Image: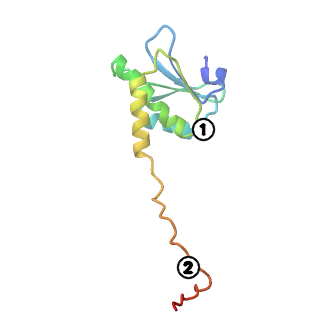
Amino acid sequence: MANLADEYGTDVEIYIKALTTTIHADTPTGAPAKLHDLLEQLGLERHEYPTSAPIYTWHTVPEHLGADEQKRLATRAIPALLLAGYEVNCTPDVFDEAAYRQAVHDARTRAPRPAAQHPAPASSPSRPAPSRRTP
């Protein structure tokens, strides 16, 4: 079985499987369970095929969705994968620019922001300033 993530050296390869309309997300052989779990959390379905070892695992976008929604779901997963530190490649026939921009916007608004930093109060001099005398 061809695994594009292994072939291209990426963490996730998103593409339409040849001679089908199915959107696949390939992960490299031996990918961490954390990556597979994240893909599932993002709405992709996990599939496994037992080979000699290790098990060949891939993900697909749910086929009950319409073609445009499948592309949007796959594209919306990209920012979350990138934020998690994974290298992702998505073919142009899957990528939906508007869905990507919205997912990036959503990720930015959900991301925890550092607490507002208040400047430290001006420190008082180590020695009191001499009092001013007026004649």
Badge 1 local density, few (<14 within 10 Å), some, or many (20+)? few
Q: Tell me how the rendering is colored.
A: rainbow
| Residue 89 position by quadrant | top right
Provide the residue designation for mark 2. Answer: 124
Q: Is residue 84 above or below residue 13?
A: below
Can residue 60 be seen here? yes
Residue sitting farthest toward the front:
135
The residue closer to the viewer here, 71 or 133, is 133
Q: Amino acid at mark 1?
A: Pro
Label disc, if present, on residue 32 of the rendered structure: 1
Residue sitting farthest toward the top:
19
Residue at the image point whose x is 43% and y is 13% from the top: 21
Question: In what element is the residue under mark 1?
Answer: loop
Residue 62 percent coordinates (x, y): 39, 24
Q: Which numbered mark, 1 or 2, is in the foreground of this view?
A: 2
Q: Is residue 1 above or below residue 112?
A: above
The residue closer to the viewer here, 69 or 117, is 117
User: As drawn, is 24 to the left or to the right of 51?
Assistant: left
CB under 8 Å between discs 1 and 2? no
The residue closer to the viewer here, 18 or 84, is 84
Q: Amino acid at mark 2?
A: Ser
Residue 131 percent coordinates (x, y): 55, 89
Residue 104 percent coordinates (x, y): 44, 35
Using the numbered discs, state the Cα–Cα distance from disc 1 to disc 2 in whole angstroms.
54 Å
